[in-house]
Image (tube, grey):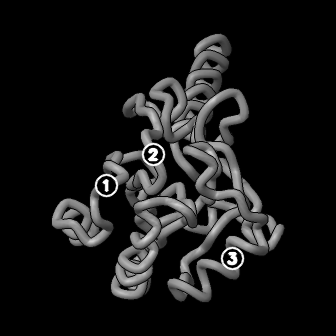
């Protein structure tokens, strides 16, 4: 009986560890102002994570990202922007410069994080989780370009990866938000 209890306790612990590793809530990062941002505060919300750049042909997506955020932010939805300089050095600025650019040009009010790497040897742990099935338990993916969108469900699990070229106000994204 004692062995059974120990085995059961071990299995429950293993399941808990597996669950913790398969959702976004395990991560803490730094926001664009250098303050800690804890993903566990987003429990129960749908989340869009997008890697951003201010000197990209897709930079105007900030406008539609902000429109999407304004429309759905009171319906348990949040957008998290991660500036990254991985594609043709299209995000060369400092966090302070990026924040000023986003505010002045697009009125960005959704949370922006500190600049990170979204690919390669220095890939940020959040993006390791987003892109590796061994960590997210759903799928492998590659960040193809700036403004790739990762959709996270209300349980903190990866749902979909959306092309960088897809407009944030696309039918696919709106449908995901409304269901």
Secondary structure at badge 2 equals: loop
Q: Is residue 26 above or below residue 135?
A: below
Q: Which of the 4 quarters of the picture holds residue 57?
A: bottom left
Left or right: where 114 falls relative to 143: right
Residue 38 position within the rendered picture, expressed as x and y whole percent measured from the top left:
70, 62
Packing grade of label 2 (10 A; few <14, some 14-19, many >=20) is: some
Q: Gap in Å between the C-alphas at discs 2 and 3?
A: 20 Å
Q: Position of residue 179 (x, y in %)?
A: 21, 66
Q: Is residue 179 visible?
A: no
Please tell me which of labels 2 and 1 falls first in the chain. Answer: 2
User: Quick check: 3 left or right of 75?
Assistant: right
Element type where label 1 sits in the image = loop
| Viewer-closest of 117 and 139 | 117
Looking at the rendered image, the quarter that the N terminus falls into is top right
In the image, what residue occupies the spot 41% across and 65% down?
46
Cα distance, mark 3 to mark 1? 23 Å
According to the picture, the residue beneath numbered tag 1 turns out to be 165
Taking depth in this image into account, of 17 and 149 the one nearest to the observer is 149
The residue under label 3 is 99
Name which residue lies at 70% across and 27% down: 121
| Number of other residues with Cα within 10 Å of mark 1, as a class: few under 14, some 14 to 19, many 20 or more | some
Q: Nearer the viewer, residue 135 or 55?
A: 55
* Whether label 2 touches label 1, CB < 8 Å: yes
Residue of label 2: 145
Q: Is 170 drawn above or below residue 2 in the view shown?
A: below
Label ID, residue 110: none
Above/below status of 155 relative to 65: above
């Amino acid at each position: 009986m004692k062995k059974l209890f120990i085995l059961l306790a071990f299995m429950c612990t293993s399941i808990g560890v597996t669950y913790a590793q398969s959702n976004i809530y395990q991560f803490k990062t730094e926001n664009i102002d250098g303050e800690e941002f804890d993903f566990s505060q987003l429990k129960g919300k749908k989340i869009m994570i997008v890697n951003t750049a201010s000197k990209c042909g897709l930079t105007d997506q900030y406008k539609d990202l902000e429109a999407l955020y304004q429309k759905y932010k009171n319906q348990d939805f949040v957008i998290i922007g991660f500036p990254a300089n991985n594609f043709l050095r299209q995000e060369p600025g400092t966090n302070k410069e990026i924040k000023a650019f986003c505010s002045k040009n697009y009125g960005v009010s959704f949370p922006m994080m500190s600049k990170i790497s979204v690919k390669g040897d220095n890939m940020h742990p959040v993006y390791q989780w987003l892109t590796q099935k061994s960590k997210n338990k759903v799928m492998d993916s590659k960040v193809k370009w700036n403004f790739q969108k990762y959709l996270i469900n209300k349980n903190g699990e990866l749902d979909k990866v959306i092309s960088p070229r897809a407009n944030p106000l696309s039918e696919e994204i709106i449908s995901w938000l409304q269901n």
